[in-house]
Amino acid sequence: MAAVPVVFNEALNLQSLGVPETSIKHGLTTMESSKWIVSVEPSQVTMVDLANGAQVTRRPIQAEAAIMNPVSNILALRSGTTMQIFNLELKAKIKAHAMPEPVIFWRWTSASNVALVTATCAYHWSIEGTDAPVKMFDRHATIGSSSQIINYQVSPDGKWCLLGGISAGEGGINGNMQLFSVEKQVSQPLQGHAGAFSTIKIEGRADPAQVLIFHEKKAGAPEHKLFVMEVGRDPALGPTFRLAPQAIPVPPDASTDFPVTVAIDSRHDVAFLLSKMGYLYAFDVHTARPLYRARISQDTIFCACVDPVEGSVLGITVRKGKVLRIALNEAALVPYVVSTLRDNDLGIKLAGRLNLPGAENLYAAEFERLVSTGDVAGAARLVAGSGRILRTPATISRFQQMPAQPGTPQPVFQYFSILLESGKLNQQEAIELAKPVIQQGRTQLLEKWLKEDRLECSEMLGDVIMPVSADMALSVYLRANCHQKAVNCMVQRKEYDKIVPYATSVNLQMDYSAMLNQLLFQNPTGALDLAKGLVSAEGGPLIDIQATAEAFLSSNRIQETTAFLLEALKDNKLEHAYLQTKLLEINLIGGAPQVADAILQNGILTHYDRAHVAKLCERAGMWQRAAEHYADIADIKRVFKNSHQMETEFVVGYFGKLTAENSVMLLKDMMARGPSAMPVVVEVAKKYHEELGSEALVPVFEAHKATEGLYYYLGAVVNFSEDPFVHFKYIQAACLLGQFKEAERVCRDSTIYEPEEVKNYLKNSKLPDPRPLIHVCDRHDFVEELTEYLYLNSLLQYIEVYVTKVSPQKTPMVVGKLFDLGANEDFVKRILMAVGTLCPVDELVEIADTRNRLRLLQPWLEARVATGSTEAGTHNALGKIYITQNKDPKAFLTNNMFYDPKVLGPYCESLDPSLAFVAYKKGDGSCDEELIRVCNTHGLYRDLAKYLVGRMDLDLWAKVLTPTEEGQTEAPERRQLIDQIVEWALPESNSADEVSYTVKAFMAAELPGELIVLLERIVLQGSDFSDNKNLQNLLILTAIRADPSRVATYVDELDNFDAADIAKICISEEHMLYEEAYTIYVKFARPEFTPDKDDQSEMQVAAMGVLVDYMKALDRAKTYAMQCDKKSVWSKLGKAQLEEKMPAEAIESFIHAEDATEYVVVCAEANEAEIWAELIPFLRMARKELQENLLDTELIYALARTNNLTDLEKFVNGPNVANIQSIGDRCFTEKLYRAAKILFININNNSKLALCHIHLEEFREAVAAAGKANNVSTWKSVCFACVKAAEFRLAAICGLEVIKFPDHVDEVVNFYSELGYFLQLISLFEQGLGLEDAHVGIFSELGILYTKHQSERVMEHIKVFFSKLNVSKVVKACERARLFPEAVYLYMADKQFDAAVKHMMDRATAFDNDLFLDSIVKVRNNEVMYKAVGYYLSTHPNRFTRLMEVVSELVDHSRIVNQLRRAGDNALMTGQPYLKSVQGANLSAVNEALNEIYIEDEDYEALHESIDNYNNFDMISLASKISSHELLEFRRISAYVYRCNKKWSHSIELSKNDRMWKDAIDTANESTDASIIEELMRFFCSKEEKECFCATLYTCYTHVSPDVVLELGWLNGYYNFVVPYFIQNLKQTHDRLNVLDDRTEPPKEDENTQDAIANTYGSMGAGFGNVLMIENGGMMPGMPVAQPGMQPGMPTSPHSFNGAPDMSGFATIQVPNSQNGYGNNMNMGMPSM
């Protein structure tokens, strides 16, 4: 059976995360994207972050609905018609809006838009800006207000909207949708339940298709159809994409089912339909063909969304809250379509479009068919659509081999053309296409394809393109990450500046020094660009900066050196100080001071030798730069001698760098050179005034008598300076220069100068214009001195000018001084009349009064009054004059409105107290304290009492009525005043306000006795205020506070007071006059006092309140309630009885009152008192007025508790709003099972109903109820109950439903097992194998049960159902049951080959050689193989060779050799065949092991062959080991090994010992060492082996020295044996001499040529001193002459670079002349003379 193409699993469960079941439903729980799930609970909003491990966040938010933005953490909330959008990350509100009508459905259509659907319209609301929701369209009649909206979709381009809803119909649930075009503003109704938009890529079309996928089911028609059609395409682009309607395979048992969601997996272009009954349908969007159908849930998946990252669909089941993840099984899709659906065409299309496995054979067969029919284009399209299946080099070869048809392109070109249309070529295809295109010269096509990214780039493709286009090749290398070749392309294109950034970005290591040295001579500009890149590379310079600079300088590249160093030193590091200095020196000495100036101007270098650079700048005439760098003041003075050549701005700015002391010294030096420097000095003084100080700068000017300079300097700073010295010196300089106006200005405006100093200077200077002095004295109050100065100097006109125009307000001081000086009174009067009203009156009057000159002012004062003056001072002065003269003072005090009573009042007290009272009374309260004092002092109590009553000022009353301190006698004036008020002041008053204020004052003064007397006189003794409510209230309140015994009397006598307020005060905690309060309420509840019936009821309720709340007289209260018989009174009584824990009496009272408002408390108290029979009448009464859940719930419970099941059943079957679920649970908990059964039947709670049946032992009914509930916990409870009751058939029915769920399988097994029902348990699981949705747990648990109870059936079970087993659990069970073969089978079938091998090694009964060998090559841990080797060596040595044949490619042979050595003596022999088979790898361990075997077997031929072919072993050790072997051949092998390892002496020594002369001679010749050969020849001479001596000469001819041969031949008489050697030697020497003669023979030249050369050199006397020197033979004109000891290529003197500087500070670079073949000989190869 093929694997299913769609897999699903439970990702998480909302209930387990704390989301209540009641919130998991449509409208309350939403999932707008795969990031968040939002659930609205009664008091909070729960948010589950799916992208962060299902982290739960709860916010205390009250809302009806909430949806989370699909992209950001933005939450939209809805409550009624109000909507708000919040940014959770920023914790800020984004928008809010109140809709005109309720929103019944909403969702996010994009990251910035919310769709809102009301009963009539659809709106779009953007979260950007402040706009309100925009109406999109009206709902169609087919989807009217009676439809429940379940879906709203917007197309990707935003131009189409789809609204979906459902409604009840005759045949079931009808679905209607409305498709709306935003552009055309038209709607089209559709009959269906769900739909969605998607964008797909259609083969053969360049533009994508926007399609609508929707379900259609017309009313009354049984068939369901799927439509796929394109919407919104421009007709100009071609016809729209549309598929024929496809029937949806709805199962027979789901005829009433309908889709609720359509989710599009855009990654695979698969549409998932989720139905109400939990069915899943999968369709291919490109063909509309069904792919798969399965029922994945028993509950409705009411909410779904697509996870674009994983290409899956998430759905939430209603109530249970399971979050299911549905995904396409890519590996199984095509095999399922081919094998199960039998649709090869669809399988090929899916495999090609999605690049899925499973259709390889189909593609190959179809390809062969098309090729055989000659359909090249069809075959190419098939390959293009096959993904990676057919796009191989073999396919390219097939097309290349196809013959071309006449008139058509080559098949391979057709193939590539179709591939390019469909997508991108792979590496091999790109290379094969590029070759013919380049041959045809159509490189523009390659460029086009590369720009369109149609070719997969590779190194080989770049190599193919490189010969024709370096630009394209570079592009290819860059894309293919061929870094070195990309750099080569950059070099070829001379893009040196790009090399370093690229190499750094790709971490490419290069030899930059060699590249730079090569470029330096070929392309200096390119070398500069490269050097800049190298020195600016990220992570630090890649070359040595100093060495690179030396390289540039060695080629006389000053400009390039400067540019390079500027780039290298831009970071301005301290370690580059030397290079910075050299950079500036190069340009200052080398004739480019402007470059050095620019460098210094930029300020990028700061670590150079400033002193050295300063000297260089001074020599170059760069005075400003020199000054900038000098630090010693002497050097600075020297440079500033040329300050006239410096810019003024520089000079001024330069002083900012000097110390104050040096600055002053330099300024003095500049001033000493004449007045020409004064302007600059003034500018410096202006700018640095704050730093240098005026005390230091002023003497610089004064020492050179530069008053004008001082004036200009101080004039610039005086307006901003706060130094008194500066202001004084400026005034002084201005006066000296005659600038009196400026002096006057400073004296007038400045606040800084020392006035005493300036005044004295101006007085002593006796300036012709005294105005500066006038301003100084006026501003600093030297008025009297000024007056005296002007008066004594006969400057009287300036006195008049001063008081009239400068400071009229200081006229009193001037007049006083004139009085003191004895001035003429007429002059004083003239001044006063001239000043007029501008003169201050008070001050002048005071001065005149103190000097007894006040009468002198009377004419001036009367003149001021005549002009309408209202100044208090003027009138005060006239008042004093009139009072003194007794000129009708009372009339003046009474009628004048402008004098100050506080001034004239005290003035009158000493003359007449009554006048003082009149004056103080005129103050209107401002002189109350003075008035009271005067009245108390002089006994004016009646006047004071009348004044107090009339004033109506409580604060004033408090002052006079404040009681004396405790322990002191009362002040007599206070008592006399109170008596005057009570006796005649208040009774005479007819003003209610005056009475009111007086009463309040007495209250505030705490005079209750006096107040009661006062009020009784007013209220009870007959007056205009007897019926005044306020006074009656006040009388009673005063009595309450002062004399409570009078309250009852006043209540009876008085009728016009505020009863309710007075009663409340009586019952307050402060007074507790409950009877008086009760009397007030009862009195005023009568109709004659309270005509309104509602107010009467309120009074009666208040009276009842006094009885029950304060007096606690419930019996008296019940009597009063029966007298009144008012519902409100009974209600008040009932509440009081309820509070006193008298529930039965309270229920009776509430029934009398027909009041059910306290039903919650009544129910609670009745339950606590268990008086359910008494409670029932109350609840029935309450239900007549209220429709509350609690009332119905408690009534049901009371009926249940009284066992009135008939009424209970009748009630629950009728209309009610009871929470039957909760009361059912309550009855169930309290074991009222029959009542609970009635309740659960009513609400169809079959789960709890089944439990009730269990407790009532009604098992068949329990099974039936569990079937209706279809809940695993219910099935489980019923199953266990049936098992306990031995009802195994019923238990099996339930058990089958339980074991469908893997989580509950173990519980079922444990329960059966504990009771010992093993066979029944096995039977249950055997039945479970036939379930449609049987899972792995069923098969696995059955296998485990077989291992325990029926072991003979285990093997058969695991073989048949292996793919459905939990292998780990079953294999452990097999091991526990010692069923080892079965365990091995499971391990191998599960591909746990390591475990299988270990099991077979550990358990002998489980071993099977074939299975072992099959498994050992598949293990993941190689250590298992080595254990297997040891196992075979110890247990199955005869099969060891076969084992090693199998694993030889997978093991470390060296380790195997070590294992063989450790296994014993015979182990190596056992492994010899294996060792020979792997010796080809030439491993040292293998070679040494085999060599040991060969030595032990004395097989010298095999040993020699092994040594020759495999030399990877310790040869010296082997040679040493066999050097003393008893067999000659082994000793020869030892010498051979020494010889191979160049141990010549050891080899020759062994050969000599064994008299193997030829071996010794060959070894000596191979060594090429003359000393070894000589030693061997002397050995042969000593042994008189003449023939061997001669053979040595012949063999070692090239390495023997003739003198040695001659010596040995002469000493030993071997003339005949050495003559052949010398003959050959002489022949060879002769031939070599001839060759040298031919090579060194000079060329022959014509005689005329020789003469011309001689004349040329003779005419060069000026350059060579008329001496023809052969040393000059190789030099070109203008080249420097090499000096003795000088390196070639270097200049001969400091001036050899045409005036370039001496760069002796840099190391010289040797530039070999390898290009001309002359080496280092500057004489062109000729010897020196």
Image (cartoon, rainbow, N blue to C red):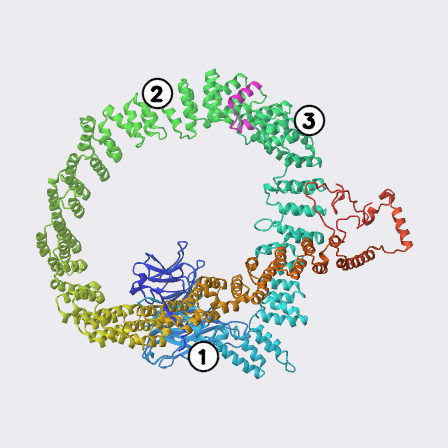
* Mark 2 burial class by Cα count in 10 Å: few <14, some 14-19, many 20+: few
Q: Are marks 2 and 3 in contact (CB under 8 Å)?
A: no
Which residue sits at x=89%, y=49%?
1654
Residue kind at label 3, given as amino acid type: Gly
Say which residue label 2 marks.
884
> Residue 946: horizontal and vertical position, in percent?
23, 32
> Residue 941: horizontal and vertical position, in percent?
22, 28
Note whether residue 1249 is visible.
Answer: no
Residue kind at label 2, given as amino acid type: Thr
Report the Cα–Cα distance between label 2 and label 3: 79 Å
Residue kind at label 1, given as amino acid type: Val
Say which residue label 3 marks.
674
Q: Are marks 3 and 1 in contact (CB under 8 Å)?
A: no
Q: Secondary structure at mark 1?
A: helix
Q: Secondary structure at mark 3?
A: loop
Say which residue label 1 marks.
338
Magenta range: 745-765
In-image side of 980 versus 56 (left or right): left
* Mark 1 burial class by Cα count in 10 Å: few <14, some 14-19, many 20+: some
